[in-house]
Image (cartoon, rainbow, N blue to C red):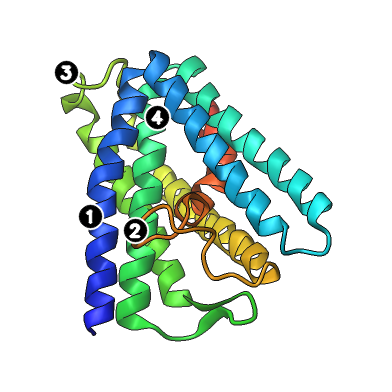
Amino acid sequence: MHLLSNTLFLRIASSLILIPVVMGAIISGGWFFALFVAIAFGLTCAEWFQLTRNNNRSLFYLLLGLVYFSISYLQFEYMRLFIENGVYLTLVCMFMIWGSDTGAYIFGKNFGGALMSPTISPKKTWSGMAGAMIGASFAFTALLYAAPYLNHFIPNTLNPDLSQLPFLIVLSLMMGYVGQVGDLLMSAMKRKACVKDSGQLIPGHGGILDRIDSLLLVIPIFVIVARYVLN
């Protein structure tokens, strides 16, 4: 119990530091955003290189990961810089994933139940999947309703059409599901490399890949939603 409490404390403390930094980079843009993305991408690739060193097909997985990360990070920059209402929509995507990860953690710890894929990730449960979808939907819906009040803080805030809310909620539930699939993909790679975490960079979370595994798969899909559905 003490270990669990300590881990939870570290997760919360790390999040309280990282979330303002991420939000500040997205809202500020310019050199701060460019530097933030460059550092995050470099750390992601460094952790991936370390993981693939323990795999017999290291070159294949190294190249596969670099392509995957490059697509996700480029789409992240594209959404922030070139899509209308990009600052707001990028924050929506981030909060949706944070909500998804939080929901998965809370539901998984409190309800447990059947495992999703014991051979890939022995701790991920279907209750955690449900929590991820609910958490993503809650964060997404909250930001849609908050949009009119954020104009003073976030430039070019979207004025969402809430008459489409049922459809948008379904989309957010799907994003929560996709995020968990991305999490499982990274878990499969870590299992091949015979490691539990991708690194120790973020206390309570592990490495940067442990923190953004859901986001990497969600971003390219959410960019399509942001461009053709939300705008």
x then y, percent, for residue 171:
47, 47
Q: Residue at x 28, y 77 (%)?
A: 4
Judging by the rendered image, the residue that carries numbered circle 1 is 13
- Please tell me whether residue 174 is drawn above or below residue 104 in the rendered image: above
Are the residues at dot 1 and dot 4 in contact (C-beta closer than 8 Å)? no
Are the residues at dot 2 and dot 1 in contact (C-beta closer than 8 Å)? yes
Graded by Cα atoms within 10 Å as few (under 14), some (14 to 19) or many (20 or more), the crowding at tag 1 reads: few
Secondary structure under tag 4 reads helix
Which tag, 1 or 4, sits closer to the chain's start? 1
Judging by the rendered image, the residue that carries numbered circle 3 is 152
**Cα distance between the residues tagged 2 and 1:** 8 Å
Graded by Cα atoms within 10 Å as few (under 14), some (14 to 19) or many (20 or more), the crowding at tag 3 reads: few
Judging by the rendered image, the residue that carries numbered circle 4 is 89
x then y, percent, for residue 94:
39, 41
Q: Nearer the viewer, residue 46 or 211?
A: 46
**Cα distance between the residues tagged 2 and 3:** 33 Å
Q: Nearer the viewer, residue 202 or 159?
A: 202
Q: Amino acid at mark 1?
A: Ala
Residue 117 visible in the shown view: yes
- Please tell me whether residue 34 is drawn above or below residue 50 in the rendered image: above
x then y, percent, for residue 192:
70, 69
* Label at residue 203: 2
